[in-house]
Image: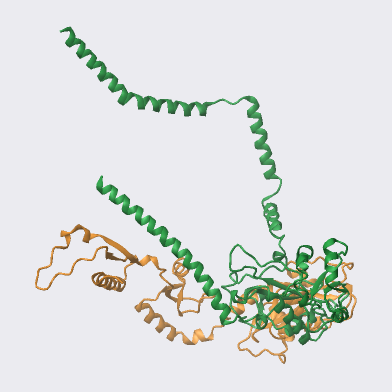
Chain colours: A green, B orange
Amino acid sequence: MLSSLLRNWTGGLSRTTALTGDLLVPSSLEITNVRGRKRALKQTITRQQKLERRLKREEREAARKQFSFMERINIRRMKSLLSPSQQYPGRLNRDEEEALPEQPLTNVFIRSHVKTQFYSVAKAIDMHRELQHPSIYNNPKAPLRLRLELNMTTEKQTKMVGSSDEIVPVPHPFSHNEKRTILAFVNDLKLQEVAVEAGAEIAVGQDMIKKIIKGQFRVDDYDFCVAHQDMATHILPLRGILKTRFPTRINGGPGVPHLGPLNMDPAEVEANIGAVVAAACAHRNAALGPFVNRALLMTIPGEEHYALDVAAWMPVPSEEELEKLERRRNKKGKKKDEKKTEGGEDEEGAETAAAAAAATA
Amino acid sequence: MLPACSRALIRSAERLCQAATASQTLSRNTWVLQRVHAAPVTPAGLPQRDPSEIRELERYEVVDYETSKAAGPLKVILLEDVEGVGHQFDVVEVDRKRARTDLLLGKKAVYASPFDLKYYADMKEKMREELAARVRIPYELLTVSRELVKLVVPLRVNMENKWKLDRRIVKTSLRQVGVDLLDDAIFLSDASASINGPNFDLEAKLVRFYVVVSQQYIIPMLGRIAHISADDSKQVLAPEKLKQPTAADLAKHGLLPEEPYYHKSSEIDNEFDVATFMRNRAGQQK
């Protein structure tokens, strides 16, 4: 009897423990969780902390009130203006004027209501001459300035066309009062003389290169360097010293990089512009599209600018170059596609595996 | 390539779609679906199985739906001249949103229904003479003139060299404020043509000149003499900030307020005495 009672009792006990094990434990856990969160919310802060917070908030508000809304906008704009390509007269964005008509609809038109009009060099010079006429700005010999806006993108999105200093030989030179010193590397003594006659400050040979490396001969005073072809291998150690002035096939040539005065013959100015544009275009693969986004003819000083039609001087990419570029692009595309399909297959595999697992379960 | 049966389904759906447009449904709500699993072809001679017998055959996927494409422009008949859209009784295709929010609501246009097309064509025929007699200035001329009459062009002249106000100076000054001319469509009034300098008494003087758009539309414009120099050390005498002068301001310079004039045909060239014509017109209006 007693034993049966005992058995019953223990049985009841085991049942209660089972109950607590199954039901009470999770709910008690919940309670502790909730209690913990509430406690964090109600946590009091000391007077010191309150003061600190208030000071911080006031400081933040004061910083915000320092400039008005428009001032803040202007500050942001000024920051973005640091890039020379963004400075006046800015950069041509063809997407922005997509909705505008190609040609003016009337003989009198507002310039901002039509797409950018591109003028011939002669017409642009004509307009500049009218502006610089003695009865208006009175600067008929103003030096002409060419502003080129370039597309610096290359095949790779993360890569840009490198910077370079360069002298461009123009077909119609003219006198300008700026002084440029040119250092020529020539081995042959006769050619050295020719180089000096052509305008180089000094022509040096192979022996001088070692002196330059040792620091006995300063090259800081020379603005540009040119080299004869037979010196190509000898000047290689100077690459680190000359940096951007180091003569390469692209930038090595003597001459003057101005366009000429306003009273110069338009045909000559046109030839000069052609030379400069062609030299600039040599820096980028022609197959990638036009390097020059917009070419503006301006005067110094003066803000008036006219867009030039430079399409004639853009290098035409050969079939071979275009094909090469296409092939390279296709290769990249293929690689990406392959990666994608591989990924897709993997996912499919995972899915089928999951489905199989579900089926077995 | 879709299976044959689903292609047939799409065809039938297209037919449905056409039927829907023909009956002028107001909502564009047609969906083109296709079966996920193609039903097996019923062998010849055997009765067709109940399509609801296999549940898988009742699963469909979306091929296309009508609202995935823009509905395109709306064809309306204009009931009055609307700038930039067309003239009265013209049948034009306009942006759907513009038509709904502006033209149709404002009773400036009606839908080009078969009845209305006939009704308004008859009315246009009836009113032909009245419509032809109406003076209608082309929209592109209006937009240019509105921009031009707002301007007070600083006429830049040199402060050291002798100058005489002429077309070239006005043209160059216009170019500097962003107005380009393809020809010499500038006419100076007699008073302004006699202005010469340098004369600092003339600084900030208002000058009247006329620009003729498309040899047809004479726009009276205002210029303001501004002596300048390429030399930075020379100061510009008057502030460059220009506001639209009132009639009282104009009177100080001996000018009258003038309105643009639209000539019936494009024949205003260098032989046309624009200055005298406009002066007489302004006198009459006064």
Quadrant housing residue A166: bottom right
Q: Quadrant of the N terminus of chain A?
A: top left
* Residue A149 appearing in the image: yes
Quadrant housing residue A338: bottom left
Residue at point 72% right, 86% down?
A: B184
- The reply, left or right, for residue B79 in relation to residue A235 is left
- The reply, left or right, for residue B112 in relation to residue B137 is left
Viewer-nearest residue: A31 or A111: A31
Q: How many marks?
A: 0
Viewer-nearest residue: A322 or B172: A322
Decide: is A140 above or below A159. below
Q: Quadrant of the C terminus of chain A?
A: top left
* Outermost residue toward the top in this view: A2
- In percent of width and height, residue A197 lies at 88, 81
- The reply, left or right, for residue A226 in relation to residue A103 is right
- In percent of width and height, residue A96 lies at 60, 69
Residue at point 30% right, 26% down?
A: A22
Viewer-nearest residue: B170 or A347: A347
- In percent of width and height, residue B19 lies at 27, 73
Residue at point 90% right, 76% down?
A: B160
- In percent of width and height, residue A277 lies at 71, 78
Quadrant housing residue A226: bottom right
* Residue B188 appearing in the image: no
Residue at point 67% right, 71% down?
A: A150
